[in-house]
Amino acid sequence: MSDRLILGKEFGEFAGSKLVELISEETIKNRIIELGKQISEDYKESVPIIIGVLNGSFIFFADLFRELDIDAEVDFIKISSYQNKTQTSGTVRLLKDISCDVSERDVLVVEDIIDTGLSMKFLKHRLEECNTKSVKFVTLLTKDYTSPPEPIDYIGFTVPDKFVIGYGLDLAQKLRNLKAIYSLEQE
Ligand code: IMP
Ligand code: MG
């Protein structure tokens, strides 16, 4: 449990908003163990490249990666669709590209949350351009209205259509270090 349940003045228009725990640290941990088993089984004949989408996925990525008992390589890509707000800007910008050769490789993209699916579409296109053998997605969270461009291969949890933070997910670059997932409720 966090002792910072009400946001302070540094959060501007969100000051006074309450953080309500949606998914506990232990529930996240147990689900990641299950995802790790499933992904290890599905990729046991392959050496996939696991690509983390920065910044939001870095904590989920590190925990999931340690639950894999297969050989796998890692890389990172950084994109931006939110501009320090709680709504997507509608365009995706590539801020840091992958630096490995993904051609003819199985690629698994690790996302923190898939919301509108815009980032997923952008990433899929960017990777398939590189002649990948396969591209799949694992996301810790989706929102319950989400209609992704294609089915998401692995989903940790589906959350209500609210802004959520913690466990890597930010509000204006902060609160990523909270160990559980919280929704942000205006009072
Ligand atoms: P999409 O392109 O709309 O699917 O949004 C994907 C990205 O937006 C995620 O990888 C997050 O970085 C960010 N995002 C979407 N919803 C939330 C949220 O509720 N909290 C924090 N970040 C979010
Ligand atoms: Mg993101």
Image (cartoon, rainbow, N blue to C red):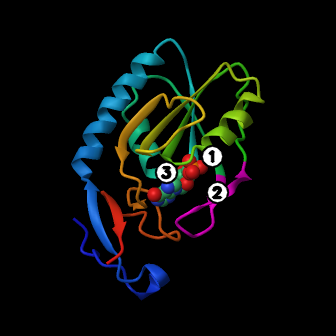
Q: Quadrant of the C terminus?
A: bottom left
Q: Is mark 1 on a helix, strand or loop?
A: helix
Quick check: is the Cβ at mark 2 less than 8 Å away from ligand 1? yes
Residue in view at x 71 percent, y 51 percent: 96
Which one is nearer the viewer's eye here, 163 or 93?
Answer: 163
Q: Quadrant of the N terminus?
A: bottom left
Residue in view at x 36 percent, y 31 percent: 35
Choose the circle earlier in sequence order: 1 or 2: 2
In magenta stretch: residue 88: yes
Quadrant hosting residue 16 = bottom left
Q: Residue 81 carries which label?
A: 2
What is the crowding at mark 3: few (fewer than 14 residues within 10 Å), some, or many (at least 20)?
A: many
Residue extent of the magenta highlight? 79-96
In magenta stretch: residue 95: yes
Report how far apart the C-alphas of labels 2 and 3 lie in the structure: 17 Å
Q: What element carries label 2?
A: strand
**One can see residue 92 in this view:** yes
The residue where tag 3 is placed is 58
Q: Is mark 3 on a helix, strand or loop?
A: helix
Q: Disc 3 marks which amino acid? A: Phe
The rendered magenta stretch, by its main secondary structure, is classed as strand
Locate residue 151 relative to residue 81 in the image: left or right.
Answer: left
Disc 1 + disc 2, Cβ < 8 Å = yes
